Image: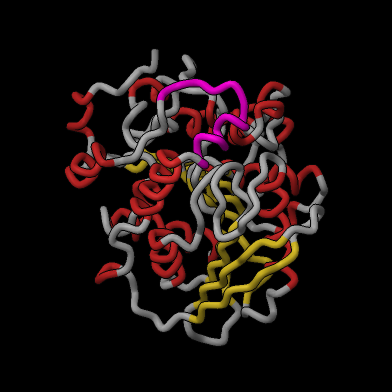
Amino acid sequence: MTIRYDEAVNDRLDPRVRALAPSWPLDPPSDVASREEILAEVASSSGRSAVAAEAAFMDRGGREAIVPAGPFSVTERDITSTPDGNRIRVQVIRPPGSESLACVYFIHGGAMSTLSCFLESYQAWARILSAHGVCVVMVDFRNAVVASSVPEVAPFPAGLHDCLAGLEWTHDHADEFGIDPARIVVAGESGGGNLTIATGLALKRDGRLDMVKGLYALCPYIAGRWPDDRFPSSSAYNGLMLELHTNRGAMAYGIEAYRERNPLAWPGFATVDDVRGFPPTVISVNECDPLRDEGIAFYRLLCDAGVPARGRVVLGTGHATELYPALCPEITNDTARDLAAFARD
């Protein structure tokens, strides 16, 4: 039986988050036998409605008065991803000026399976972030279940391949967009936090960690299966913004990789040796998030490995609150300011 959070913890939430929590579209709390079962559900009438509701939620109240009007330079490109030869999309958002800027290469969330960087909340977030004096590059990769702006869907390692290809493209086009290649930080929230860390692991494996100045993972989705007795938050807050107590996350993205304990798919399996030598890394978690404790555990792993790591706990917030700029704009802006300074300084 799935465990749902006790609403008595609501007194810990910012009142704006408390008011929002009941409207979050949750996944059905049931296990599935295969990824194909998930794909069939998504293709059904009820599945299409659920996908539309999730996208609509991400499009609530994007720009209004909270997002800087600009001017920003916005460029979109279709690029070829390696090694699979598929097409992905990137968007570059840059504030005015001709100076060479630090860059935040941002990977959207959605459990590596849904959403798109072109949804309104991500577009608003990118402009808020860029207003702090950085160039933002966002990548729309192959999701595992629901197509982003890229029509193809595929499980692990497709999304990771695309994120690496987009990062390489960013380096190759740094001069074109006034990006300082020595100040590129990879960042992302939730599933994007998973892919942020996995990008670091893949770069280390390939001897290319010098491509990034640092990593900044917000509320990373890295354990692969919940609840987990090691992480009390995975039970205490399940059902608040996220419904985790099924095998759907691992089944959708990479059940074989989960069974193999592959940290490139599920960085919660990473060891001290896997992360030793990482660049400066920030792990930012939300107080009332079922993923909070696995993020904190990963921060401690980084510390044990001698990585220059920093942890943040954003009080009063649920999962990825910062990525809904209209909800708690000062919290969003505070995290954007911190991330931009991490890239710049």
Q: Position of residue 57 (x, y in %)?
A: 34, 51
Q: Position of residue 344 (x, y in %)?
A: 54, 66
**Range shown magenta:** 29-43
- Quarter holding the N terminus is top left
Q: Main secondary structure of the magenta part?
A: helix
In the displayed structure image, the side of residue 30 where residue 164 appears, left or right: right
Q: Is residue 114 visible?
A: yes
Q: Position of residue 13 (x, y in %)?
A: 23, 37
28 over 286 or under it: above or below = above
Looking at the image, which residue is at 48% across and 23% down? 246
Q: Is residue 33 magenta?
A: yes
Name the image quarter holding residue 186. Answer: bottom right
Looking at the image, which residue is at 40% across and 39% down? 46
Q: Judge by depth and name the residue closer to the eye, 340 or 91.
A: 91
Name the image quarter holding residue 175. Answer: bottom right
Q: Judge by depth and name the residue closer to the eye, 144 or 258.
A: 144
Looking at the image, which residue is at 57% across and 66% down? 137
Q: Position of residue 155 (x, y in %)?
A: 67, 40
Q: Judge by depth and name the residue closer to the eye, 320 or 12.
A: 320
